[in-house]
Image: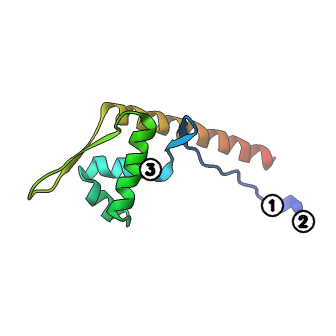
Amino acid sequence: MDTENITYTVRGRIWIEIHHKTLLGEGKVHLLKKTSELGSLRKAAKEMNLSYRKAWYSLNQMNKAAGTPLIVLKRGGRQGGIAQITPFGKEILGKFEKTEEEFIVFLDAQTRCLNL
């Protein structure tokens, strides 16, 4: 095998844990962003091809792990309920995104090192 023409790529994923419980990972971040954007967990779940039950469970697990809500759900009547991201939810999303950006820079640097 000719190893001189091989190109290596370093990949990885990050998640944030609290007390050994996953708070945020890629899928949960996507759910939080979509719910915040649409103002509805039901609409976010539908757009992401998730059952409402699974989306609600994920959100509930995040809120429990954090000890404070990331998104607050308010039941509605005919118009449906609303979902609002909390200040803590915005803060933790920002921290996740910053960490992810730095992680990508790290992975790119490691890829360059392997391919020298």
Q: Which of marks 1 and 3 is in front?
A: 3
> Mark 1 highlights which residue?
6
Marks 1 and 3 sit apart, C-alpha to C-alpha, by 35 Å
Q: Nearer the viewer, residue 66 or 1?
A: 66
Q: Is mark 3 on a helix, strand or loop?
A: helix
Q: Would you place residue 94 above or below residue 7 in this image?
A: above
Q: Nearer the viewer, residue 32 or 94?
A: 32
Marker disc for residue 28: 3
The amino acid at mark 1 is Ile
Residue at image x 88%, y 61%? Answer: 3
The amino acid at mark 3 is Lys
- Mark 3 surroundings: few (<14), some (14-19) or many (≥20) residues within 10 A: some
Label whose residue precedes the other's in the sequence (2 or 3): 2
Q: Do the residues labelled 1 and 2 touch (CB within 8 Å)?
A: yes
22 left or right of 46 in image: right
56 left or right of 82 in image: right
What is the quadrant of residue 57 in the picture? bottom left
> Mark 2 highlights which residue?
2
